Amino acid sequence: FFSSVTMVIGVPTGIKVFSWLYMLAGTRDRLWDPIMWWIIGFVVLFTIGGVTGIVLSASVIDALFH
């Protein structure tokens, strides 16, 4: 159950992250702006959180807990 729910949430989230990266690709001249570092940090941490969520929702772990 948890694996399938995570995948349903993961696909739109992946599309969102790639949309953010595409948006950031057009702002090369503002790379040293502090707000850009905040945005890049948010996208990186958001992606790391998503990857760890997919790993933690693996079928093996799901079977161990139930």
Image (cartoon, rainbow, N blue to C red):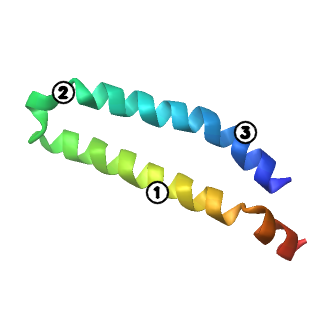
As drawn, the label of residue 48 is 1
Vertical side of 27 occupied by 35: above or below: below
**Residue 20, image x, y percentages:** 38, 31
Amino acid bearing label 2: Thr
Q: Is residue 26 above or below residue 62?
A: above
Gap between marks 3 and 2 measured at Cα: 31 Å
Q: Give whichever of 41, 57 is nearer the camera.
A: 57
In percent of width and height, residue 45 lies at 40, 55
Instruction: Mark 3: give few (<14), some (14-19) or many (20+) Cα within 10 Å.
Output: few
For mark 1, give the secondary structure: helix
In the image, farthest residue toward the front? 60
Residue 57 position (above or below residue 21):
below
Amino acid type of disc 1? Ile
**Element marked by disc 3:** helix
Q: Mark 3 or mark 1, which is nearer the start of the sequence?
A: 3
| Marks 3 and 2, the one that precedes in the sequence | 3
Disc 2 crowd, CA 10 A, few/some/many (<14, 14-19, 20+): few
Identify residue for label 2.
27
Are circles 1 and 3 on residues that touch, CB within 8 Å?
Answer: no
